[in-house]
Amino acid sequence: MQNSDKNSDKNRRDFLKLGALGAAAAACGSMLCSSCGGAPEEGEKVKLLSPDGKLVEVDSKHLKHVHHLIGVSGEEARKGIPGRKFVMVIDLARCKNARKCITACQKMHHIPEDKEWLQVKLMRDNPESAPYWFPKTCFHCDNPPCVKVCPVNATFKRQDGLVLIDNERCVGCKFCMAACPYSTRVFNWAEPELPNEFEDIQYSPETSFPSKVGTVEKCDFCPDMARQGLLPDCVTACPNGVFYFGDENEDVVSNGEETVRFSQLLKDRSGYRYMEDLGTKPRVWYLPPTDRIFPVERGLDDLPDNIKDRFKDVM
Amino acid sequence: MKNFAPQIERISTMTKVWIGLLVLVIIIGCVALYQQIVYGHVVTGMRDHVIWGLFIANFIFFIGISYAGAILSGTLYVFNVPWRRPIVRIAGLLTIAAAFIGPIFILLCVGRFDRLHYLFIYARLQSPIIWDVMAITTYLVGAILYLYLTLIRDFSIYGDADFLKIPEWKRKLYKKLSLGYNGKPEQRSQLKNATRTLALVMIPLVIIISSVLSWIFGMTLRPGWHSSIFGPYFVIASILTGVGVIIILMWTFRQRYKLDNYLTDKHFKYMGYIMLVLSGIYGYFSFSEYLTGWYVSEKWDAEVLEKLFSFHEYGWWFLFSNIFAVVLPIIVAVIPKLRKPGPITFAAAFMVLAMWVKRYLIVIPTLETPLVPMQDTREAWIHYTATWQEWALTATGLATLILIYIVFSKFVTIVPVSDYIDDEAEKVEAPATDSKTAVPEANVS
């Protein structure tokens, strides 16, 4: 008994550390200096800690994203991480549609640009109210309509709260896509283009990689990262700390910069869940877009036309 | 029996041309299927919002007319309706043919053909798709058995009819298929009891599976689908469509094989009455479904209804489907002058088309109205447009149905001869005593 208490205490301390480490880990741990190609992104200088302890500055185009795809076996992936109850809080007051979460997610999961597991919508509840940016992940509902309807148990609810998909089981009937009221899921309509370097990597429902034609996929809350004590990439990539990720059992969430009590955050900021009335019991909470730190129009700056066009009906 | 001999003795050039054309359509469909398998579902018009398209509409359509065949032939048999004779076989065959074609369309919606067996080895009872798998397989077995039972006596007659100019193998096959039936009273009563029992079983079975089919839609949080009326709505819509198809088939066979003496005007009139009643119920269900949705105008319901009512979107189709599925059949069946095979078949044909459009209108507008705003700029993602592959496979479904009928009609008579031989025998044996059944029979044969 004492032992287990100690354990959970230790876990908590680890997790609190996780917040401070998260940002650094994402910057250093998952990015390695590499001279070989990859997709070069011009521009920004990035500060990195070299293996011998020196701070170096490199151009981001020489950086190559290496995400360690540590996938647990299919059976393990169905159980979940013991003792955890993952939860996310999204602070709508801070989002300015920088779309860094989207690109980070696409990079991490090796999905093409036109496939967005994570989306940012421009919401306007009625013509009188102000529009606001609305990042939308999978809600990993506690009463998941998608899991109910799956005929072959390809999508499942784990004890740590996550809803995942086993694309080696999925028959591609798309019933889950019809059932999900949040349009979270995407389908591989054609053979997905996969990066060559991962050709013989083992698939795991926790990494959702590699994609397979004729199967469904979606945001997975990056449980492989959580197993390594890291925050999901969308959380750490956000320049404004919009996303808080954490554990409901430990009552703590972190956006990489600050780590706060989950229950207190919801209380202080009147957290709510999107479309609560549907009864799906999402595991993602929103903090209302009051006292926003950016004017909503800022979100339209520097957007390519095809993305800007998405919002023309709202603004 | 002699009257029907030409039908199964030879195949005319006209029929051969038809078979050729239908096979051609099926070949084109196979090309489309091949493309879908090789390139993935990207060759269809379906995308992440409209995840189901023509295929699922066809699935509901074909499986629906199959149910109608079963429930109609079952009811007519159980209640021993005297004018049922020439219709039961057409209906029974529709049951089988459509029940084979329908599920193929839902399989076309499935992304991984190589994993279809997962539906059995990993089946999860919570999923309405598994309910459907169980229901349809049970139903198929029942329907095949039922049709076969009604055919046994005919097979024995064909096998024994020496005047039939048919190849020896065909005669042997008939004899085999008749399972040694020779018309002894004991055999007769056994067969009658079995057929009757199965017919009784088929009626509730059809209601159950029709409802299960509707629940694939009803069990989702989608406007226009999540409705408690969907079960009975689908049952009635299925039967109505099937009755229409049966009327079309009756008319076609009557023209083709000169069956005016068997498929009389009276049969068309009675089928018209059935169509009238079903159209009425269907119209009433439609009305209450749309009235309650429109009156309350809950956010998402209102969005779907707006698309259905707007002439810039689905308005014309919506109008078409209601006028031709509800108004026209009722008008034709109500006015005595129009209660003739021609007008009734005409109304039935348009009704069937309208009901297919209705299936499309159930599936597509709802999927184009997600709860979270789409905010997409890709036209194919926003609006569904079926590709030629989807149309080709749709045409293949129809062609297969017609082909099955043609092939079948070369193999057995479209009107069960055994029943008529019975009638004649009964009339000879007891001309006056059995007036109850003899009187309507007299009009028929």
Image (cartoon, rainbow, N blue to C red):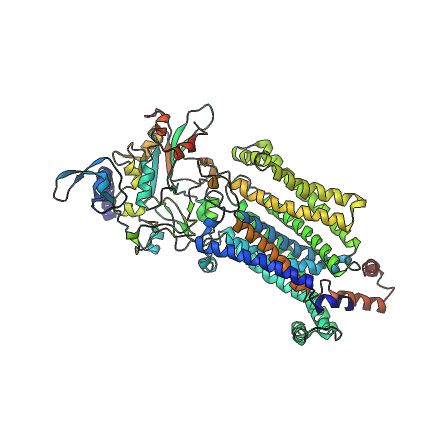
User: Which residue sits at x=28%, y=43%?
Assistant: A39
Above or below for B379 versus B103: above
User: Which residue sits at x=73%, y=43%?
Assistant: B330
Q: What is the quadrant of residue B159 in the picture? A: bottom right
Above or below for B426 versus B200: below
Q: What is the quadrant of residue B264 in the picture? A: bottom right
As drawn, is A44 to the left or to the right of A98? Answer: left
Where is residue A31? Give x, y as percent: 23, 43
As rendered, which of B416 and B380 lies closer to the eye?
B380
As rendered, which of B203 and B213 lies closer to the eye?
B213
Where is residue B175? Give x, y as percent: 67, 74
Work out which quarter of the rendered image holds the N terminus of chain B and state it: bottom right
Work out which quarter of the rendered image holds the C terminus of chain B and state it: bottom right
Where is residue A44? Give x, y as percent: 23, 35
Above or below for A161 versus B115: above
Where is residue B279? Give x, y as percent: 69, 44
Q: What is the quadrant of residue B294 in the picture? A: top right
Q: Is residue B97 visible?
A: no
Q: Is residue B8 visible?
A: yes
Question: What number of labels is visible?
Answer: 0
As drawn, is B40 to the left or to the right of B413? Answer: left
As rendered, which of B271 and B207 lies closer to the eye?
B271
